[in-house]
Image (cartoon, rainbow, N blue to C red):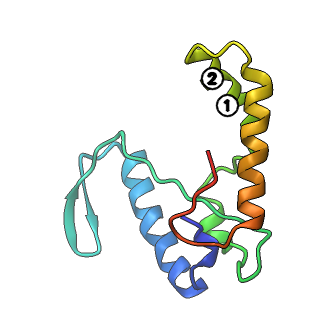
Amino acid sequence: DEFNRIDLEVLSVVAQQILTIQRAKSAKLTEFQFEGSTLPLKMMCNCFITMNPGYAGRSELPDNLKVLFRTVAMMVPDYAMIGEVMLLSSGYLEARPLSRKIVQTYKLCSEQLSAQDHYDYGM
């Protein structure tokens, strides 16, 4: 999670480890050598990383790690639409205006209340 917050030296080591696993998968091996140990390999295993490139304190991934992954763009979900569907599926008849009010309430809470771990205003 958020790989671009990890030190570059560590990311370089991680890139080599991931490359070892990917090469074993490409060769369709059932076992492979990983840092001196023989490990079983399940062909259904995968590796995913997340990162938020626009935030302070984040760095770019090294090229040897970038080439091992495919880029997928994400966007902020439409919370009002999600809320509307959830309310409709629960039997509410006026789901659209209610979902907008709920989203607005959570938005105001997240902006105006103090930041504490037990508050979570996401969906």
Q: Can residue 75 be seen in this view?
A: no
Q: Which residue is drawn at 29% across and 75% down?
A: 35
The quarter of the displayed image where residue 104 is located:
top right
- Relative to 86, is 113 on the left or the right? right
In the image, residue 20 lies at what x, y percent? 41, 63
In the image, residue 51 lies at what x, y percent? 65, 64
Front one among 72 and 32: 72
- Say above or below: 84 vs 62: above
Reading the image, the residue beneath label 1 is 83
In the image, residue 27 lies at what x, y percent? 38, 46
SS state under label 2: helix
Q: Which residue is drawn at 66% across and 22% down?
A: 85
> What distance separates the C-alpha of mark 1 from that of mark 2?
6 Å
Q: Which amino acid does label 2 sit on?
A: Leu
- Say above or below: 5 vs 96: below
- Relative to 113, is 8 on the left or the right? left
Neighbourhood count class around disc 2 (C-alpha, 10 Å): few under 14, some 14–19, many 20 upward? some
Q: How many marks?
A: 2
- Say above or below: 15 vs 46: below
Q: In which quarter of the image is the C terminus?
A: top right
Reading the image, the residue beneath label 2 is 87
Neighbourhood count class around disc 1 (C-alpha, 10 Å): few under 14, some 14–19, many 20 upward? many
Tell me whether circle 1 and circle 2 mark residues in contact (CB < 8 Å).
Answer: yes
SS state under label 1: helix
- Relative to 21, is 120 on the left or the right? right
Front one among 94 and 34: 94
